[in-house]
Image (cartoon, grey):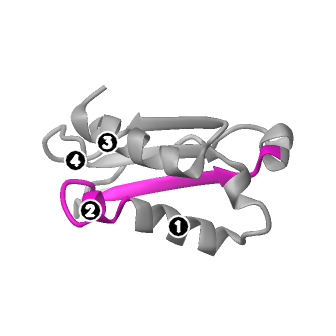
Amino acid sequence: MNAVQSTIERKLSALEPMYVDVVNESHMHSGPATASHFKLVVVSAAFEGIRAVARHQRVYQILAEELAGEVHALALHLYTPDEWQVTSGVPVSPNCKGGSLVD
């Protein structure tokens, strides 16, 4: 686990998650393999009664410093404990086309 990934995980503890997974997906994107693209899976009672947009805003607020710096992209999968129990799993992230003009 790299420093950015550790920082993200530490900061997400503010949500008192029952489950958190911070996956560095930078290797799936074009350019140098840096710690810049992450998939986050967070299960927290803090999301109870909060719509998806507000959940995302809360995570963006917690990670504002990282998003202003080295983190380029976040794929957010945010669940309440009840939602997590019935989820069929976290979606697989697609490989990035890297802005290439050639498909």
Of labels 2 and 3, earlier in sequence is 3
Name the quadrant of the C terminus. bottom left
Real-space Cα distance between discs 1 and 2? 13 Å
- In this rendering, the label closer to the viewer, 4 or 2: 2
| Residue 53 in magenta stretch | no
Please say if 52 is above or below 72: below
Helix, strand or loop at mark 2? helix
Seen at 41% across and 48% down, the residue is 11
As drawn, which residue projects farthest toward the left?
A: 32
Of labels 4 and 2, earlier in sequence is 4
- In this rendering, the label closer to the viewer, 1 or 4: 1
Real-space Cα distance between discs 2 and 3? 10 Å
The location of residue 46, given as percent across then percent down, is: 68, 57
Real-space Cα distance between discs 4 and 3? 23 Å
Of labels 1 and 2, earlier in sequence is 1
Whether residue 94 is visible to the viewer of this picture, yes or no, is no
